[in-house]
Amino acid sequence: MARKTTAQAAPSGDPPAPSALSDQVDTTSPAAASPGHGEAGGTDPAATLPGPPDAPALAPEPDTRERVKALVLHDSIYGKCGEVREFDADHVSALKGAGYIDPHPKAVESAGG
């Protein structure tokens, strides 16, 4: 019994018959060559949004928060006992109520701050 083959190379060195190429990917087609079409992790350059071409860098905003000097009353994450440090004015009342700091000017002055 003779065996039947589907792909035979022509004696002149031509590529195999088209039936043998049906299982292979055509790497010369534009769809196979461009990334992002069916590939995981590929990106399509047209999908990115262009930014302004010559946008100046934004200057950092100055710190406009009000700061208050206060005496640290005991060692904690806010400092060591006896240190005078600056705290956000918004947080001072809560830290004072919790017993971490004393923002009174006389307390700050007595500690040398």
Image (tube, grey):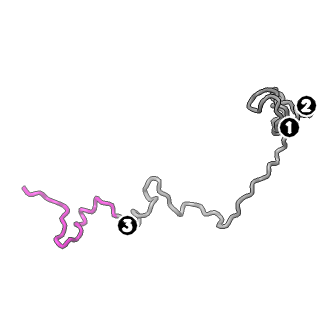
x 90%, y 32%: residue: 104
- Which residue occupies the foreground of this view, 113 or 57? 113
Number of other residues with Cα within 10 Å of mark 2, as a class: few under 14, some 14 to 19, many 20 or more = few
> Which residue is the site of mark 2?
110
x 11%, y 57%: residue: 3
Three-letter amino acid code of the residue under disc 2:
Ser
Residues at marks 3 and 2, CA–CA distance in whole angstroms? 82 Å
Three-letter amino acid code of the residue under disc 1:
Lys
Earlier along the polypeptide chain: callout 3 or callout 2? Answer: 3
Give the mark toward the camera: 3 or 1: 1
Local secondary structure at mark 2: helix
> Which residue is the site of mark 3?
29
Which picture quadrant has residue 105? Answer: top right
Earlier along the polypeptide chain: callout 1 or callout 2? Answer: 1
Q: Is the magenta region chiefly helix, strand or loop?
A: loop
Number of other residues with Cα within 10 Å of mark 1, as a class: few under 14, some 14 to 19, many 20 or more = many
Earlier along the polypeptide chain: callout 3 or callout 1? Answer: 3
Give the mark toward the camera: 3 or 2: 2
Q: Decide: marks 1, 2 in contact (CB < 8 A)? A: no
Whether the magenta-drawn stretch holds residue 19 is answered as: yes
Q: Which mark is residue 69?
A: 1
Three-letter amino acid code of the residue under disc 3:
Ser
Q: Which residues are magenta?
A: 1-26
Q: Is residue 80 above or below residue 22?
A: above
Q: Decide: marks 3, 1 in contact (CB < 8 A)? A: no
- Which residue occupies the foreground of this view, 14 or 102? 102
